[in-house]
Image (cartoon, rainbow, N blue to C red):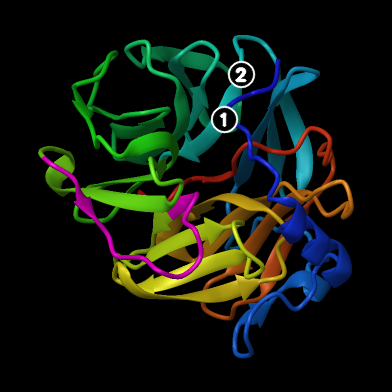
Amino acid sequence: MSNPLRWQSPGAAAIAFLVLAGCGAQLAPAGTRDFGSAATASPTKKGKAAYAYTCQGSPSLTDCLVYEAGKLVRKVTKDLTVPAGVVAGKSGTLYVADGGAKDILEFSAGAEKLTATISDGRNVPADVAVYGDELAVSNATTMTFFAKGAKSPTRTLKDSKAKKGTGAAFDTSENCYWAFVNTSSKAQVDEFKACTGSPHALTITAGAPYGIAFDGRNNLYYTSYESAANGVYVCSGTSSCTLTYKGFIAPQYLNFTSGFKDVWVDDTGNYQCYCTGLYEIDVSTGKTVGTITNGLSNFDPPTGVAAGPGSL
């Protein structure tokens, strides 16, 4: 049985375009930053995240991987069912949205041990975000919010237009954001002020938001794989969004390192392009400073990516 939370391949026309374009092709207008041909470096400890986390949740391979300085140092298989999105707290704590178990799994820094199992109230989590000790979770049809220390949802946030949840994020003002596919089969991002109340739909016209994250100045970043212009988009606040990092095939999730210095992106790739990997981009220069491919396969692509310590 396939994982309903995994990235779904684009339509035939999009695939045909990608085959013609090739991996790392010029998929965006001039002026954007193309990391595709330069993504050969290995992440280092100096000034970078101590850990990089990802998971794989296909029926044939279920695990979470921990990298340090680009080297695979730990593979977690116990306690996982269908891992999806991941995030790391400021102390390096790893949170995994487990869609099969309908829980959020909390691991110590470096994923050395499972420290807590947080019930998602029978929802099916796709992604998780953290702010301090609070969590926001993107589920199949709802968003759940967890106050500090909560072992079950503190409250459930809803939008009647939601069809399939994808990304979750906090901004530095502690507002919650939920990315999902709506009933019109369009990508949408909702804002919940103070993580409560009714949703406010953001007006985003560029690309198709999937994974979402905010930098330290509350500028929205999001991945898009829906069109020929695949990549990472950067907004001014939550508007005027432009394709800034191109060269991806199927970028899914993204998360910032401590201090918002770098952003990590996972690219699931496709069967035509063996470019599945985790990519670390220096925000100030736009250059790729780290690439991880070991332990990953386009047949069992990563379901998310996080840096530990994280940004919030």
**Outermost residue, bottom direction?**
30
Q: Quadrant of residue 58?
A: top right
Residue flagged by tag 2: what amino acid is it?
Val
SS for callout 2: loop
Q: Quadrant of residue 21?
A: bottom right
Q: Identify the residue at horizontal 47%, vertical 56% (top origin).
A: 209
The answer to whether marks 2 and 1 mark residues whose Cβ atoms lie closer than 8 Å is yes
Res 62 visible: yes
Provide the residue designation for mark 2: 82
Rate crowding at label 1 as few (under 14), some (14 to 19) or many (20 or more) other CA atoms within 10 Å: many
Which label is found at residue 92? none
Q: Is residue 292 above or below residue 236?
A: above
Rate crowding at label 2 as few (under 14), some (14 to 19) or many (20 or more) other CA atoms within 10 Å: many
How many numbered marks are there?
Answer: 2
- Quadrant housing the N terminus: top right
Residue flagged by tag 1: what amino acid is it?
Leu
Q: Which is nearer the eye, 270 or 263?
A: 270
Q: Is residue 74 above or below residue 1?
A: below
Res 90 visible: no
Provide the residue designation for mark 1: 5
Q: Identify the residue at horizontal 59%, vertical 40% (top origin).
A: 304
Q: Identify the residue at horizontal 76%, vertical 52% (top origin).
A: 12
Q: Position of residue 36 (x, y in %)?
A: 77, 71
Specify start and end residues of the magenta stretch as a single range: 198-212
Q: Position of residue 43 (x, y in %)?
A: 71, 58
